[in-house]
């Protein structure tokens, strides 16, 4: 491939390429609200057809459709391009532009950024990758790999129906040599951070009401003065929650919770030793707006805690009156949303039974547990895999020595590709930057010249990654 010809096309068509990203974020696709999902799926299918995928379709599931496409380059090697087209809701206060408006504004120190829901999670990267592919064919070159596109519309819901698609298309997917997820992996200072895996997740809800408990209000909130002679489901739940962890909230007291937790592997420790030398914890804290880590840990100790500790987290809790002013009520129900992040070698199926036994043992049999998502396991790819080395080679070609993380502390459905039945190496990558996913003013940098790459650099890096994958797989 003549990369320079492709790179020139990317630069010459910058404005058009920005417009694709703006079109994508303007099209709602909020999976939690089922808002604009099918319209967005159709839009991406049309993009794939325009690219040259002779087979591009919506594959129906019990939930949102998967957009499938096959680009036949007549190549020896095939790569699955994993994407997601759904987003989180955009109802948070604090947006400086309408979240679905597709506005490009100046954001120091980065320069022009696209600020919108989905800009970095991950419509920006989706659009940039398709722009890169079209630039290859536009100059008479051929994409150097056969591409199987898999764009799901339920990642923000836990990828609950993605297994249906994988089971239906397993014979096609098994022809692939690797899976690539286009991302933008620079931090706000321009450092490239590469992750080789994810933690798993189980998401569930605890609920207690007066009717099921047999104590407290049974149908509706009652006057707060009745606490003198009526039990409180809310206080009962809080007592139950307090038994789950140590007083500081940082050690899970559920019997057997840590039984299957594996220590870091020798390869992991090699990566941690290198990572410690470049880990910039102050930038991490600044991005999250936190002042300190648990127990004021730093460096290697912080990394080991972050990556190899399973978590039990309260995502949300509500009961009774939460509006302005005062309203004295004794609530009849309390609901708590929680998640557990799984590290190697924990399993999805072990979590709920252990918590159920803990609550029963401590006298809280009345509390209901509902698993809200299927959840998925942890996943990891070795740094020695050719697909990973191809992405690392790309970073070095662009002048970056990547900071390699054994895995991230977040969760994604990578296990569905790199475990049975596919057992494929899974790698992500791209030289660009964005931030504030799931938060107001989510953004992706589009202008060059700041501390990070913009859209042109991001698209160039995707071209180089495809080229290197074709030579190294």
Image (cartoon, rainbow, N blue to C red):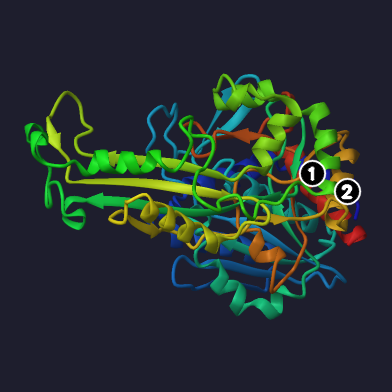
Name the spot of residue 27 as percent of width and height, x first: 47, 50
Residue found 60% across the figure and 77% down from its top: 167
**Residue 351 visible in this rendered orientation of the protein:** yes
Image quarter hosting the C terminus: bottom right
Q: Secondary structure at mark 1?
A: helix
Name the spot of residue 264 as percent of width and height, x first: 76, 46
Residue found 83% across the figure and 27% down from its top: 277
Q: Quarter-wise, where is residue 242 in the image?
A: top left
Seen in the picture, residue 204 relative to 93 is either above or below; the reply is below
Whether the residues at callouts 2 and 1 have beta carbons within 8 Å, the answer is yes
Image quarter hosting the N terminus: bottom right
Q: Nearer the viewer, residue 26 or 306?
A: 306
Name the spot of residue 164 as percent of width and height, x first: 54, 74
Q: Secondary structure at mark 2?
A: helix
Q: Nearer the viewer, residue 394 or 115?
A: 394
Residue behind mark 1: 460
Residue found 20% across the figure and 57% down from its top: 212
**Residue 293 visible in this rendered orientation of the protein:** no
Seen in the picture, residue 92 relative to 174 is either above or below; the reply is above
Q: Quarter-wise, where is residue 331 in the image?
A: top left
Residue behind mark 2: 3
Name the spot of residue 221 as percent of width and height, x first: 12, 42
Q: Quarter-wise, where is residue 357 in the image?
A: bottom left
Q: Is residue 108 left or right of residue 52?
A: left
Whole-number angstrom distance, CA of label 2 to CA of label 1: 8 Å
Mark 1: give few (<14), some (14-19) or many (20+) Cα within 10 Å: many
């Amino acid at each position: 491939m003549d990369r320079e010809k492709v790179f020139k096309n990317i630069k010459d068509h910058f404005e058009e390429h920005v417009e694709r990203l703006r079109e994508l974020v303007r099209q709602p696709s909020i999976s939690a609200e089922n808002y604009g999902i099918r319209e967005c799926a159709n839009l991406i299918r049309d993009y794939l057809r325009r690219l040259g995928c002779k087979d591009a379709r919506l594959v129906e599931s019990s939930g949102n459709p998967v957009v499938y496409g096959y680009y036949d380059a007549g190549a020896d090697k095939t790569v699955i391009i994993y994407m997601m087209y759904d987003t989180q809701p955009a109802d948070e206060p604090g947006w400086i532009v309408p979240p679905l408006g597709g506005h490009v504004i100046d954001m120091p120190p980065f320069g022009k950024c696209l600020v919108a829901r989905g800009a970095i999670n991950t419509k920006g990267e989706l659009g940039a990758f398709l722009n890169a592919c079209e630039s290859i064919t536009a100059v008479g070159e051929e994409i150097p790999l056969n591409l199987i596109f898999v764009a799901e519309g339920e990642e923000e819901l836990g990828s609950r129906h993605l297994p249906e698609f994988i089971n239906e298309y397993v014979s096609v997917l098994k022809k692939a040599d690797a899976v690539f997820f286009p991302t933008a992996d620079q931090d706000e200072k321009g450092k490239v951070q590469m992750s080789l895996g994810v933690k798993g997740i189980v998401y569930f809800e605890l609920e207690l009401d007066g009717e099921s408990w047999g104590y407290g209000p049974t149908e509706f909130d009652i006057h707060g003065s009745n606490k003198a002679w009526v039990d409180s489901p809310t206080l009962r739940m809080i007592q139950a929650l307090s038994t789950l962890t140590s007083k500081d909230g940082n050690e899970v007291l559920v019997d057997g919770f840590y039984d299957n937790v594996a220590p870091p592997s020798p390869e992991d420790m090699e990566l941690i030793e290198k990572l410690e030398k470049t880990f910039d914890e102050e930038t991490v804290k600044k991005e999250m707006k936190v002042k300190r880590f648990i127990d004021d840990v730093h460096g290697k100790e912080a990394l080991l805690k972050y990556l190899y500790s399973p978590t039990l987290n309260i995502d949300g809790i509500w009961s009774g009156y939460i509006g302005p002013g005062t309203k004295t009520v004794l609530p009849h129900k309390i609901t708590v949303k929680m998640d557990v992040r799984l590290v190697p070698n924990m399993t999805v199926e072990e979590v709920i039974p252990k918590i159920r036994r803990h609550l029963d043992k401590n006298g809280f049999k009345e509390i209901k547990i509902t698993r809200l998502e299927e959840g998925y396991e942890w996943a990891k790819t070795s740094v020695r895999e050719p697909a990973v080395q191809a992405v690392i080679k790309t970073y070095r070609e662009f002048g970056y020595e990547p900071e390699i993380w054994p895995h991230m502390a977040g969760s994604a459905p990578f296990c569905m590709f790199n475990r049975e039945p596919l057992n494929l190496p899974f790698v992500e990558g791209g030289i660009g930057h964005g931030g504030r996913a799931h938060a107001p003013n989510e953004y992706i940098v589009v202008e060059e010249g700041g501390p990070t790459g913009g859209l042109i650099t991001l698209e160039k890096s995707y071209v180089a990654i495809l080229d290197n994958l074709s030579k190294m797989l």
